[in-house]
Amino acid sequence: MKLDVFPHILPKRFFDRMLAVAPPTLYLQKRMRAIPVLVDLEQRLRIMDRYEGYAQVLTLASPPIEALGGGDVTPDLARLANDGMAEIVARYPDRFPGFAASLPMNNPAAALAEIDRAITGLGATGVQMFSNVNGRALDGPEFQPLFARMASLRLPIWLHPARPASVADYAGETRSRYDIWWAFGWPYETTAAMTRLVFSGLFDRHPDLAIITHHMGAMLPYFEGRAAGGLDQLGSRTEDPDDLLRRRPRAVRHRHALRSREGAGVHP
Amino acid sequence: MKLDVFPHILPKRFFDRMLAVAPPTLYLQKRMRAIPVLVDLEQRLRIMDRYEGYAQVLTLASPPIEALGGGDVTPDLARLANDGMAEIVARYPDRFPGFAASLPMNNPAAALAEIDRAITGLGATGVQMFSNVNGRALDGPEFQPLFARMASLRLPIWLHPARPASVADYAGETRSRYDIWWAFGWPYETTAAMTRLVFSGLFDRHPDLAIITHHMGAMLPYFEGRAAGGLDQLGSRTEDPDDLLRRRPRAVRHRHALRSREGAGVHP
């Protein structure tokens, strides 16, 4: 079996509600409308039929739930999305053996309640978060109860990048050009979000917490040598309040100890 | 012979002048001061002695010349830096077979004159630019004569990333944390700058122009599949003024034609 763990879907009833409530300026919505399989389940199944043993763990497509409205309307939207994915999983358990629930992240109390409802009530495999919550970093205090709950449930968090075209490539410009915001900005956003989570100590507080990062881990798999050696060397010489020699989380110290023991040493 | 084409140096007289004139807030300056081999040539040579057949093409270390002062003072600083590198090359031609000249990019007319002086007069191997000029994109019209001159000289441009810690990781924050701006922001900046140069048609105007990007090409070598297939697919569905199907430069169309002919097809 080939299990695709990060395909996207927009369950029909959720999609219709999203179009009705979302701000018309939402950029990706125009693009998503032109991908029929996101909404059309029969067409999705016909394509999946071509690949023997191929199954999908479903996640909601961009935009994030919290971009669709205020904290008063997003809890209901998340429930609608999760009910829709749960229905599809119940109907085709062999094709869709699970789903990651969406959360109304701009209403952390409701998000916590939706974790419990989706996992206990709907059988979700985990939850999806985006690399920022309407611009807020995930290491903010309001989101920590959500990470703690997922750690105690021992279920993973799917991490999807988020960055709009309005994040310009250069200071003094008003929007990104040539899809740079998406093509390279998204892997960058995922990596920045994970770095913030690591160095803010998330994995020290919850050593077994699993986060599934989109796009093959984004930048770190390819830039591990740069990041590890560089942060050791430059981070130790700075007057930065985040000085990494003083603040380095246990998880990173442990990795370095392992590397030294293996004789790999530290990158120059 | 192993030729290191992107090591950095700060010739002593230039370094002293830089410390005297640079704004005290320049971030990397504090870090650079703690790397003795940047300035101490004897110590550099002692380290190089350990590696048989190892030689360096010299480039100036960050910060960019144009960050050190207004367009009235940077031309003189660039000349001082380039004279310093040329002296070292003349003294140790086997250890340092060449150098890339620095340019006062905030004074494009003086930068053009310095290209000619450094290459004809000092024997520079090429020139170094940074991924932005005090925030300005390199596809701005004021920089195009510099690219044209390098193309007509048939000599390469070294492209170094530039992003300060003051570029925050998230909206509403005042500075980047945990060196994210440097560890991942720099490869992102290099890639964004190259993308802008490609899609603005630079390589259509100058097909043989060579740009040496720092850090092993930054993101594109690892994200080529994402960028190529993704831009084809999403770029064709957008109402974006930069719509890539309409604006795609000849250089990219050519590459795609090659891929199709080789049967590689287009990424999903």
Image: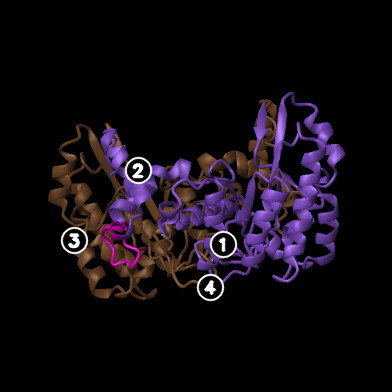
Chain colours: A purple, B brown
Q: Is residue B211 visible?
A: no
Q: Chain of mark 4?
A: B
- What is the spatial separation of the Cα atoms under label 2 and label 1, in whole angstroms? 34 Å
| Res. B12 mark | 3
Please state which of residues A84 and B46 is positioned toward the viewer in this rendering. Answer: A84
Mark 2 in CB contact with mark 4 (< 8 angstroms): no
Amino acid bearing label 4: Gly
- What is the spatial separation of the Cα atoms under label 3 and label 1, in whole angstroms? 35 Å
Place of residue B202 in the rendered image (x, y in percent of width and height, measured from the top left): 57, 52
For the point 46% across and 41% down, which residue is it? A222
| Res. A169 mark | 1
Q: Chain of mark 2?
A: A
Q: Is residue B117 visible?
A: yes
For the point 61% across and 44% down, which residue is it? B227
Q: Which residues are magenta?
A: A235-246
Place of residue B97 in the rendered image (x, y in percent of width and height, measured from the top left): 26, 42
Label 2 neighbour load within 10 Å: few <14, some 14-19, many 20+? few
Task: Give the mark nearer the N terminus: 2 vs 1.
Answer: 1
Task: Give the mark nearer the N terminus: 4 vs 3.
Answer: 3
Q: Are labels 2 and 1 on one chain?
A: yes
Is label 2 or label 1 in front?
2
SS of the residue under disc 3: helix
Amino acid bearing label 2: Arg
Mark 4 in CB contact with mark 3 (< 8 angstroms): no
Mark 2 in CB contact with mark 1 (< 8 angstroms): no
Q: Are labels 4 and 3 on one chain?
A: yes
Label 3 neighbour load within 10 Å: few <14, some 14-19, many 20+? some
**Left or right of residue A183, residue A41 in this image:** right
Q: Is residue B171 shown above or below A16?
A: below
The residue identified by callout 2 is: A255
